Image (cartoon, helix red, strand yellow):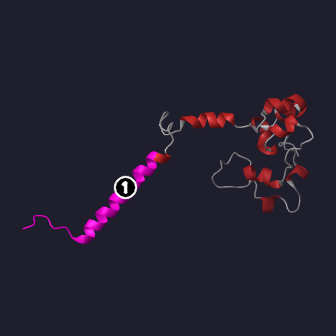
Amino acid sequence: MRWLKIPPQIVRLLLVTFVIVSCYLILRQILTPVSFGAFGWYRAQALEEISARTPVFAGRQECDQCHAEILQTQAKFAHKTLGCETCHWVGQPHVEDPDVKTAKLTDHTCLRCHEQQAGRPAWFKQITSKKHYAEDRCTECHDGHKPDEK
């Protein structure tokens, strides 16, 4: 008399589960980097990889070397907390070679921050672009460095 009779479908299910779990554990051992877990749920080597990358952002200090008057003007207005690269995109290539131009400003540059959205606070200046202007560009009426003036 057999004291334990397991149906064949359960045996197959257990076998498939065992194979899947075994494959997972083997692949996890193979694919997990050695430095994983040294600093919690991070790879320790990631810090070295990130620091070895060539910087693409120049920073406000680099812009200040040639464009000090613009930064002084901007410091008096609402955009004083924004870095130059927030609107003009990455600046390291321009710093290395002044003939390389920064990105051309488009309406999208302004609207990604100032287009009306329900999640933004009421004090933040927002517009509904279809109502605010028809064919004009933002920069035809507003100066990004002096946004409070028209």
Name the spot of residue 131 as percent of width and height, x first. Answer: 79, 61
In the image, residue 63 sits, relative to residue 7, either above or below, namely above
Residue situated furthest right in the rendering: 99
The amino acid on which the numbered mark 1 sits, given as a three-letter code, is Val
In the picture of the structure, the residue carrying the numbered disc 1 is: 21
- Name the quadrant of the N terminus: bottom left
Q: Position of residue 101 (x, y in %)?
A: 89, 44
On screen, residue 119 above or below 148: below
Residue 3 belongs to magenta span: yes
Q: Quadrant of residue 83?
A: top right
Q: Nearer the viewer, residue 58 or 147?
A: 58
Element class at badge 1 = helix
Q: Which residues are magenta?
A: 1-29
Label 1 crowding class (10 Å Cα cut-off): few <14, some 14-19, many 20+? few
Q: Nearer the viewer, residue 102 or 140?
A: 102
Q: In which quadrant of the rendered view does residue 47 lie?
A: top right
Badge count? 1
**149 within the magenta span:** no
Near-viewer residue (143 or 51): 51
Farthest residue in the left direction? 1
Provide residue 65's location: percent of width, then percent of height: 87, 28
Tell me if 106 is positioned left or right of 48 in this view: right
Query: In the image, residue 4 lies at what x, y percent?
Result: 13, 64
